[in-house]
């Protein structure tokens, strides 16, 4: 295990600033996921940590040591990239063994090391095969095995599941955390898949345009996305976003949806009269009877049954579209008039002009303040 510190990294390609004064601290043994849209700079950042490319400005510290000017092979880093990058003329065994061969380990030690990691990744039966005789999933595991075999204290994984089929990706998403924990390395893991990010990361750094926009645990980011763009990146189906102007009434702050008041318990009067965007996760909305308190009339337009959930598109009287998600197998309306209820305590308010999440009332400190 080791630590990684990036200090004020700048990387430019001609006039294009790809990494823009980026700083990042990864703790000993932490699994940090770099998550962001295509082109946000994730791969460049990883290659820079590996020592494959140099920053224009800033420092890279591994285990507290300044490695900015140290060659890739002397950084003690294991890497696996999305395109596998296996040597085509070598067997899977030799591919996996290559980092150990480079350090002149004994033949027995190499064989034992390769066998152990190949068994862990369930590719011990294809070790004699050349890459062209391996499935994509086996290639991906071979590349991963090569990254793991030298037990590097810092492991860099660049979207290693991108080129594998959905079934294997699902399995690996379950297996990888255990595997990486057993390895005991500090891990920086790149993905464009928010589910993978949430399954694998102790923390997630959300990147966009060469900067880290938010960093936190998966739950922190899901439950308090820093802005609308991040809220949209996490969640399937995507979060509902509705223009609203909160008001203050006797019972606190509320917004009106089809003339029905939805109380926002986590917000105070500061947001009253502001142009806002209300964020509602589809899984926090439920279908209810017309007589239920807070029932909002809608028309059900379409229903999409997926494996684990059913997603319904509903339309309010004012023509606002709302997605509702419920676990598969639970009953709900298929078409026509219906009613939904919104849980205001699980809603977000974003400032419409800046897109930033508006601060919620810290109930704990409020309570303490009142007690004092
Ligand atoms: N060698 C290079 N020369 C010029 N521009 C480059 C080079 N390498 C990367 N870039 C640019 O840097 C930006 C960030 O690229 P990067 O590969 O890091 O994105 P990414 O977030 O990893 O995307 P993806 O998820 O699609 O892999 C892109 O605009 C890319 O075109």
Image (spheres, helix red, strand yellow):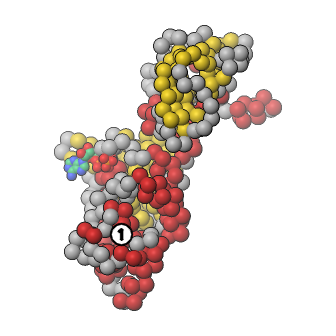
Q: Is mark 1 within 8 Å of ligand 1?
A: no
The residue under the point 67% across, 16% down is: 290
> Is 281 located above or below residue 337 in the figure?
below
Residue 164 placement, left or right of 264: left
Tell me which corner region of the image, top left, top right, bottom left or bottom right, holds residue 362.
Answer: top right
**Closer to us: 320 or 269:** 320
Tell me which corner region of the image, top left, top right, bottom left or bottom right, holds residue 53.
Answer: bottom left
For the C terminus, give its image quadrant.
Answer: top right
Q: Position of residue 232 (x, y in %)?
A: 45, 34
The residue under the point 57% across, 44% down is: 219
> Is 167 located above or below residue 323 in the figure?
below
State how many labels appear: 1
Circle 1 residue: 142
**Closer to us: 294 or 359:** 294
Tell me which corner region of the image, top left, top right, bottom left or bottom right, holds residue 83.
Answer: bottom left
Q: Where is residue 173 in the image (x, y as percent from the top left)?
A: 48, 56
**Residue projecting furthest to the right:** 371
The residue under the point 48% across, 58% down is: 171
**Closer to us: 18 or 302:** 302
Q: Is there any visible trace of residue 38 in the rendered image?
A: yes
**Residue projecting furthest to the left:** 14
The residue under the point 55% across, 28% down is: 324
**Closer to us: 311 or 320:** 311
Q: Is there any visible trace of residue 79 in the rendered image?
A: no
Circle 1 Cα neighbour tier, 10 Å, few/some/many (<14 / 14–19 / ≥20): many
> Is 158 located above or below residue 148 in the figure?
above
Residue 35 placement, left or right of 181: left
Q: Is mark 1 on a helix, strand or loop?
A: helix
Q: Position of residue 97 (x, y in %)?
A: 34, 78
Q: Where is residue 299 in the image (x, y as percent from the top left)?
A: 53, 16
């Amino acid at each position: 295990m080791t630590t990684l510190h990036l200090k004020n990294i700048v990387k430019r390609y001609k006039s294009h600033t790809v990494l823009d004064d980026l700083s990042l601290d990864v703790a000993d043994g932490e699994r940090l996921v770099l998550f962001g849209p295509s082109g946000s700079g994730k791969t460049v950042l990883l290659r820079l940590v590996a020592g494959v490319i140099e920053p224009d400005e800033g420092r890279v510290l591994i285990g507290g040591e300044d490695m900015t000017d140290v060659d890739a092979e002397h950084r003690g880093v294991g890497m696996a990239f999305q395109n596998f990058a296996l040597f085509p003329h070598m067997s899977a065994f030799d591919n996996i063994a290559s980092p150990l061969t480079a350090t002149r380990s004994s033949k027995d030690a190499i064989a034992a090391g390769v066998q152990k990691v190949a068994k862990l990744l369930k590719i011990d039966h294809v070790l004699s095969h050349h890459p062209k005789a391996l499935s994509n999933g086996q290639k991906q595991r071979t590349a991963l095995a090569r990254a793991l075999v030298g037990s590097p204290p810092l492991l860099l994984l660049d979207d290693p599941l991108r080129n594998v089929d959905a079934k294997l990706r699902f399995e690996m998403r379950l297996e990888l955390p255990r595997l990486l924990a057993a390895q005991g390395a500090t891990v920086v893991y790149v993905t464009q898949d928010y589910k993978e990010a949430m399954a694998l990361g102790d923390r997630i750094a959300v990147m966009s345009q060469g900067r880290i926009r938010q960093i936190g645990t998966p739950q922190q980011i899901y439950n308090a996305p820093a802005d609308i763009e991040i809220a949209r990146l996490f969640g399937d189906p995507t979060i509902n976003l509705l223009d609203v102007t909160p008001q203050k009434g006797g019972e606190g702050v509320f917004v009106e949806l089809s003339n029905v008041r939805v109380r926002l318990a986590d917000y105070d009067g500061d947001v009253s009269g502001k142009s806002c965007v209300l964020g509602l996760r589809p899984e926090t909305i439920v279908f209810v009877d017309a007589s239920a308190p807070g029932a909002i009339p809608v028309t059900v337009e379409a229903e999409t049954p997926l494996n684990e959930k059913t997603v319904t598109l509903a339309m309010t009287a004012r023509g606002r579209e709302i997605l509702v998600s419920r676990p598969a197998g639970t009953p709900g309306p298929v078409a026509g008039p219906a009613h939904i209820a919104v849980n205001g305590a699980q809603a977000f308010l974003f400032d419409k002009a800046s897109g930033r999440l508006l601060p919620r009332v810290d109930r704990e400190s409020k309570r303490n303040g009142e007690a004092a």
